[in-house]
Image: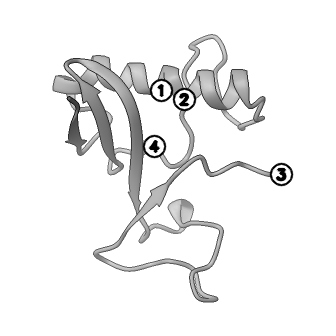
Amino acid sequence: MFDVHVVRSRSNTAYAAQLDDMFRQRYDVFIRKLKWDIPGVDHRLGREMDQFDGPDTVYLLVMDGSAVLGASRMVPTTEPARRFPHPVHGRPARRQRCLGVVQGARQTR
């Protein structure tokens, strides 16, 4: 059986190992397997982090014991630099109490 853990910050020390595992899994999927060119990725670290991984990002970790099976993240839509580039109903998503779910948002140039 698995559990879903809500982790409110990437600096959460109680989940440091699991978050590190999640960033490594994302690197394996998006960089190695899908060959995405995501700006700012430090390939020496083998972790995929982007502009949506801020101190206020909320992560949902699907776990079996201490093993991370999957993850998703939600980000506030109130800061201009963190807003989604895709409009919702013709307007940018931006609300005080709104979190947007980022699921493999591919970066384009």
Mark 3 lies on residue:
109
Q: Residue at x 58, y 88 (%)?
A: 89
Q: CA distance from mark 2 to mark 3?
A: 20 Å
List x then y, in percent, for residue 107: 72, 49
- Horizontally, residue 49 falls left or right of residue 94, namely right
The answer to whether the residues at label 1 and label 4 have Cβ atoms under 8 Å apart is yes
Determine which quarter of the picture holds residue 88. bottom right
Instruction: Say whether disc 2 or disc 3 marks the residue closer to the N-terminus.
Output: 2
Mark 4 crowdedness (10 Å alpha carbons): few <14, some 14-19, many ≥20: some
Residue sticking out furthest to the top = 44
Instruction: Say whether disc 1 or disc 3 marks the residue closer to the N-terminus.
Output: 1
The amino acid beneath tag 4 is Asp
Instruction: Name the disc covering residue 26, or none.
Output: 2
Instruction: Say whether disc 1 or disc 4 marks the residue closer to the N-terminus.
Output: 1
The amino acid beneath tag 1 is Phe
Residue sticking out furthest to the right = 109
Q: Secondary structure at mark 1?
A: helix
The answer to whether the residues at label 1 and label 3 have Cβ atoms under 8 Å apart is no
Instruction: Name the disc covering residue 53, or none.
Output: 4
The answer to whether the residues at label 3 and label 4 have Cβ atoms under 8 Å apart is no
Determine which quarter of the picture holds residue 54. top left
Q: Residue at x 54, y 34 (%)?
A: 49
- Is 37 rendered above or below residue 109? above
Mark 1 lies on residue:
23
- Is 98 rendered above or below residue 105? below
Residue sticking out furthest to the front = 1
Q: Secondary structure at mark 3?
A: loop
List x then y, in percent, for residue 30: 66, 32
Instruction: Say whether disc 4 or disc 2 marks the residue closer to the N-terminus.
Output: 2
